[in-house]
Amino acid sequence: GQQLNQSPQSMFIQEGEDVSMNCTSSSIFNTWLWYKQDPGEGPVLLIALYKAGELTSNGRLTAQFGITRKDSFLNISASIPSDVGIYFCAGRETSGSRLTFGEGTQLTVNP
Amino acid sequence: KAGVTQTPRYLIKTRGQQVTLSCSPISGHRSVSWYQQTPGQGLQFLFEYFSETQRNKGNFPGRFSGRQFSNSRSEMNVSTLELGDSALYLCASSLADRGEDTQYFGPGTRLTVL
């Protein structure tokens, strides 16, 4: 079945630093999504990507859909304490197929 | 537009009981997916309903079931609860139309089985 490898599993950074995390898949995806989850809450959609090579920004967040369609990355610039949380990538092979989620990256930002 | 709502938010049950969780999708969304999330684990896919039909199914035992109504609201049922069923249960809805299938999550139902 599909496998999604997300790395790193955790990151400890200082406020103001930039962050990068990525996901790689064993399958070709036509959709990549990035979510952030706070403790006890549901994941919140950050960025959605639908085309290979697509680069999309949402404030300090930037995500790219890899040209091989098997990977995606998320960058956070100038991190702030409220960026703390778990970041999940998710991908879909075809329209109508189930989403596959990465295992998450736990981000800690030290003020 | 209101987001995905889930009820109840918190639930405590004992082993052997059954439970029903409810999810109301974003207005106009026709697909509802359910996930189980346990501490330290990622999101484990349970099933997806689209237009009242189960479209995708994860690898969970038959004790886990669901349904979707004509207004797209969905319920998930777990019978004969086990301690290991304690988790955050999340539902997500999507438009599921012309390739627009981005999923939006509800706040989740925290189920504790004693």
Image (spheres, rainbow, N blue to C red):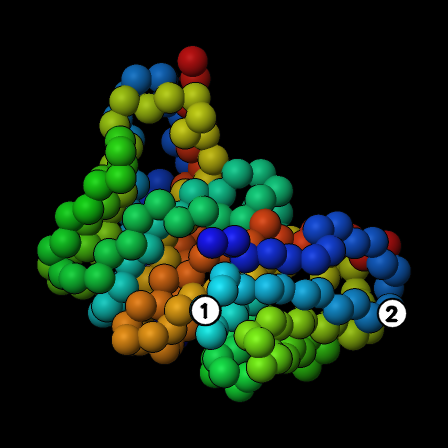
Q: Indicate the chain on which mark 2 is placed.
A: B
Q: Residues within 10 Å of mark 2 (few under 14, many from 20)?
A: some
Quadrant that contains the N terminus of chain A: bottom left
Q: Indicate the chain on which mark 1 is placed.
A: B
Residue B74 in sight from this viewpoint? yes
Q: Position of residue B111 (x, y in %)?
A: 74, 55
Please, what is the three-letter code of the amino acid marked with disc 2? Gly
Q: Position of residue A37 (x, y in %)?
A: 49, 43
Front disc: 1 or 2? 1
Q: Residue furthest bottom?
A: B53
Instruction: Say if labels 1 and 2 share a chain.
Output: yes
Residue B29 falls in which quadrant of the image? bottom left
Q: Residue furthest top?
A: A111
Q: Observer-nearest residue: A9 or B86?
A: B86
Q: Is residue A75 left or right of residue B4?
A: left
- Identify the residue shown where x is 52% and y is 53%: B2
Q: Residues within 10 Å of mark 1 (few under 14, many from 20)?
A: few
First in sequence: mark 1 vs mark 2: 2
- Identify the residue shown where x is 25% and y is 28%: A77
* Labels 1 & 2 near each other (Cβ < 8 A): no
- Identify the residue shown where x is 52% and y is 38%: A38
Residue identifier under label 1: B28
Q: Is residue A98 above or below residue B54?
A: above
Q: Position of residue A39 (x, y in %)?
A: 58, 38
Residue identifier under label 2: B16
Residue A20 in sight from this viewpoint? no
